[in-house]
Amino acid sequence: EVQLVESGGGLVQPGGSLRLSCAASQFTFSSYWMHWVRQAPGKGLVWVSRINTDGSATNYADSVKGRFTISRDNAKNTLYLQMNSLRAEDTAVYYCARGDTGSYPDWGQGTLVTVSS
Amino acid sequence: QSALTQPASVSGSPGQSITISCTGTSSDVGSYNLVSWYQQHPGKAPKLMIYEVSKRPSGVSNRFSGSKSGNTASLTISGLQAEDEADYYCCSYAGSSTSVFGTGTKVTVL
């Protein structure tokens, strides 16, 4: 069974930085595109970013472009999301997800990021 | 990257059928047969229910079906059961390797 385990969430002040990790197991991590999706408290799902299999191509939602950086380490089976210049509106549960564009069959349990002073 | 539009809530009695709409634009839903649907129970991660408009992953009940016409996709749940009460989200490929989710629909089983 595919396993995706996020970590790194927590409380951070506005303007601060945080790096999320997603440890993958039980599948060939290097063969799949990976994504980050977030969900603000009581709100809907929002696609954030994706990375291709070898990390050479990345895409971002307009709301995080220039502030967030997605990356991966295929040797460690781990996906990352570096989040800089954090704002209150970035407060959300962040999920990593495996899948092709537009279809995500596998999700982690999520990690909560709270941006507040 | 505007969210796809879904009704905020849909309800039905056990055994009935309900349909959730998901309206996008010619740049997302209307251009690609890459619409998926997710079920999310409170405090849980989303679960894929339909992909590529109408395909069901292994293990998903055949009570769930999907379709698309123009810029609007739909999810139909037939034989509504208490366990179907959850939030449902559509998602579409939006070009340039990006995706967009719907606003979400709360399904209530009366």
Image (cartoon, helix red, strand yellow):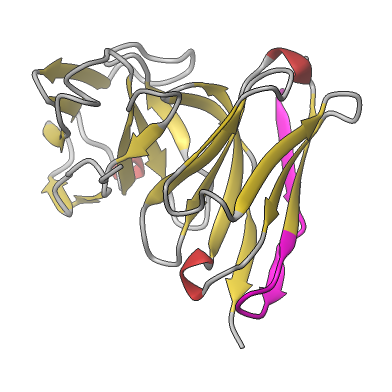
| Position of A107 relative to A86 (above/below) | above
Q: Quadrant of residue A2?
A: top right
Spot occupied by residue A6 in the image (x, y as percentages of width and height): 72, 48
Q: Is residue A7 magenta?
A: yes
Percent position (x, y) of residue A41?
45, 67
Q: Is residue B61 left or right of residue B42?
A: left
> In the image, what residue occupies the spot 12% across and 33% down?
B19
**Residue sitting at x 48%, y 13%:** B58
Q: Which residues are magenta?
A: A1-18
Picture residue at 73% right of the left edge, 36% below the top: A71
Q: Does B67 sit above or below residue A35?
A: above
Asked whether the viewer can see residue B78, the reply is no
Q: Quadrant of residue B3?
A: top left
- Return the residue nearer the eye: A21 or B82: A21
* Up-down relation of residue A103 to residue A117 (above or below): above
* Residue B53 horizontal/vertical position (percent): 27, 16
User: In the image as oriented, which residue stretches furthest toward the left?
Assistant: B70
Which quadrant is home to the N terminus of chain B?
top left
Is residue A88 part of the magenta span, yes or no?
Answer: no
Say whether residue A66 is left or right of residue A24: left
Residue B40 vs residue A7, the one in the foreground: A7
Percent position of residue A101, x then y: 46, 22
Question: Relative to B87, is B11 on the left or the right?
Answer: left
Most distant residue in the bottom direction: A117
Query: Which residue extends farthest right?
Result: A75
Q: Is residue A45 above or below residue B54?
A: below
Q: How many marks?
A: 0
Query: Does the rendering let one see residue A64?
Result: yes
What residue do we see at 45% from left, 24% from top?
B97
